[in-house]
Amino acid sequence: MEERKILEILVDWNYWGNFKEEFIEREIYFDQLKGFLEGREVIVVKGVRRAGKSSIVYQFVRNLVKKGKEKDVLIVNFEDPRFPPEINLEDLNKIYEVFLKHVNPNNPKYVVLDEVQYVDKWERFVRFLSETKRIKVFVTGSSSKLMSEEYATVLTGRHLDVEVFPLSFKEFLLFKNVSLDNEIEMVKKRFLLANLLNEYLRFGGFPEVVLFENEKRKIELSRTYFSDILTKDIVKRFKIKKFTQVESLAKIYISNIATIQSFNRIKEALSLSLDSVERFSKYFEISRLFLFLNNFRYSVKEQIKSKKKVYVIDPAFYSAFGFKFSENIGRIMENVVAIELFRKKEFNPKLEIFYCKVNGSEVDFVLKEGLEIKQLIEVTYASAKNEIEKREIKGLIKASELLKCKDLLVITWDYEDEIKAENKIVKFIPLWKWLLQLKS
């Protein structure tokens, strides 16, 4: 690449050049990144496509340097179309040399390599910057293209991973300029919160989708994201020859979110081998398009062999395929709870999440830490006590006795209470309140 062209690209993507864009701070990830600043480990930021990884890292490093010290940061966005389709180590070294020659001869403090999966053997260059130059390096990319198994061998013990999800409901409100400073504000804005929760359940939390006002545009963009994940992060990434097979399996899962799925039944329905169904499902999980839960068993072997419960990474994809929102709101609620739990798991590695189906009873979520079952959660679309089905309470009670767990929670649409049933305390909390983690 020509030196002048490299400099033109760098000028357009750096705060010391023409790049002036400011982003909404996503506090939960900023706090995590701050905790990773000490030490020389490379910070790998990954997650589902379009979740906001680049925005988070750009804003974070921008906040790290004082005004007038912008040249302490080098940002390279490898998705810029002016870069050649194939970038190698030699190109990386040249990019770095151009920065030293024209911008900061003393080495930057922070380097961001955005969408680094486009660069062959990027791990070696990153290790050079981190170990030889003592530079803090941030790397971003889609989960399917930044599989830890592939870079861990070169960066053994030298990297820390951050997984970015689409917006939580709390972040969604921030993007909508809604603040909740205290309990009074929460009560005042109760009806507004209900309306915004409806929007969140329908159109999800992808940042760009959230910022669009037009519903048709939201749906079109969500469909584009879904298609891009299938084609670029799964079919192309894993060299799958028959796109229609992957697409058909994805459609089965998207139409059956928050339900238990049998791989054997799916293989019959799609005329696929069991190996193909298992493999494609694993690719979905790696790309973070779909996430799966095992049935809780004390035997790990039995957990792995159990039927899986499937959830999509964002409810926007469910709406994008035209499924009726009002008829399936209970399943969408459960899906949102599942993704929130997966998000929490990223900040609490000890947390394990299961569903539980035993003796004819089913509990939506079993939360386990170490050897202890911490909480059992049931999700239901109910707004009053008389709308709570008895079988849901019975299922919780039965599971609590079996799993020796006292913390029983039912997440509802808009019903809040605490009852005693068969000498067990069952708490009820509205979904919006649980998502915001406000104390009852």
Image: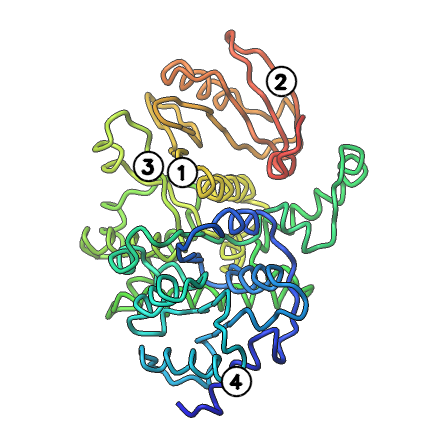
Q: Quadrant of the N terminus?
A: bottom left
How far separated are the C-alphas under marks 4 and 1? 43 Å
- Assess disc 3: are there few (<14), some (14-19) or many (≥20) residues with their C-alpha within 10 Å of its C-alpha: many
Q: Residue at x 43, y 17 (%)?
A: 405
Q: Residue at x 27, y 33 (%)?
A: 303
What is the number of the mark on residue 102? 4
**301 lies left or right of 167:** left
How far separated are the C-alphas under marks 3 and 2? 29 Å
Q: Which residue is nearer to you in this view: 252 or 189? A: 189
Q: Which residue is mark 3?
A: 294
Depth-wise, is mark 2 or mark 4 nearer the camera?
Answer: 4
From the top left corner, tell me how far across and down residue 131 is, in percent.
Answer: 35, 61
Residue type, label 2: Glu
Check the image and report above or below for 177 versus 243.
above
Q: Which residue is mark 2?
A: 418
How far separated are the C-alphas under marks 3 and 4? 54 Å
**88 lies left or right of 322:** left
- Assess disc 4: are there few (<14), some (14-19) or many (≥20) residues with their C-alpha within 10 Å of its C-alpha: few
Mark 2 or mark 1, which has the lower sequence index? 1
Residue 242, by quadrant, is: bottom left
Mark 4 or mark 1, which has the lower sequence index? 4
Mark 2 or mark 4, which has the lower sequence index? 4
